[in-house]
Amino acid sequence: MMTKIIQIAFIPPPMSRRRKVSAKIEIRSQIQMMNAKNTIISQRALKNG
């Protein structure tokens, strides 16, 4: 009996790679996202504290 081989789909590349944005701009956008996330976390901590 033959069994089907199931292949897991590859993770799509980040949007910046698809748009061919330079590495410098990609790193800057990642830093901005990280800073925004940290700001939200600190605001929640102050609100709950």
Image (tube, rainbow, N blue to C red):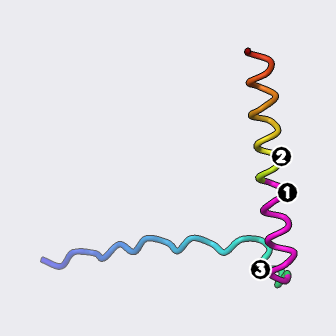
> Mark 1 and mark 2: span between their CA atoms?
6 Å
Q: Which residue is mark 2?
A: 36
Q: Position of residue 18 (x, y in %)?
A: 77, 80
Q: Residues within 10 Å of mark 2 (few under 14, many from 20)?
A: few
Which residue is rendered at x = 28% and y = 75% of the image?
4
Q: Which residue is mark 1?
A: 32
Res. 47 image quadrant: top right
Q: Position of residue 14 (x, y in %)?
A: 71, 71
- Pick whichever of labels 3 and 1 is earlier in the sequence: 3
Residue 40 relative to residue 7: left or right: right
Residue type at the position of mark 3: Arg
Vertical arrangement, residue 3 with respect to residue 22, above or below: above
The reply to whether the C-beta atoms of the residues labelled 3 and 2 are less than 8 Å apart is no
Residue 8 relative to residue 41: left or right: left
> Mark 3 and mark 1: span between their CA atoms?
19 Å
15 falls in the magenta region:
no
Residue range in magenta is 22-33
Q: Which residue is mark 3?
A: 18
Task: Find the residue positioned furthest to the top.
Answer: 49
Q: Residues within 10 Å of mark 1 (few under 14, many from 20)?
A: few
Which residue is rendered at x = 30% and y = 76% of the image?
5
Can you tell which of label 3 and label 1 is closer to the viewer? 1
Which residue is rendered at x = 74% and y = 15% of the image?
48
Q: Position of residue 11 (x, y in %)?
A: 57, 70
Quarter containing the N terminus: bottom left
The reply to whether the C-beta atoms of the residues labelled 1 and 2 are less than 8 Å apart is yes
Which residue is rendered at x = 76% and y = 52% of the image?
34
The reply to whether the C-beta atoms of the residues labelled 3 and 1 are less than 8 Å apart is no
Count of numbered badges drawn on the protein: 3
Q: Nearer the viewer, residue 49 or 12?
A: 49
Residue type at the position of mark 2: Ala
Residue type at the position of mark 1: Gln
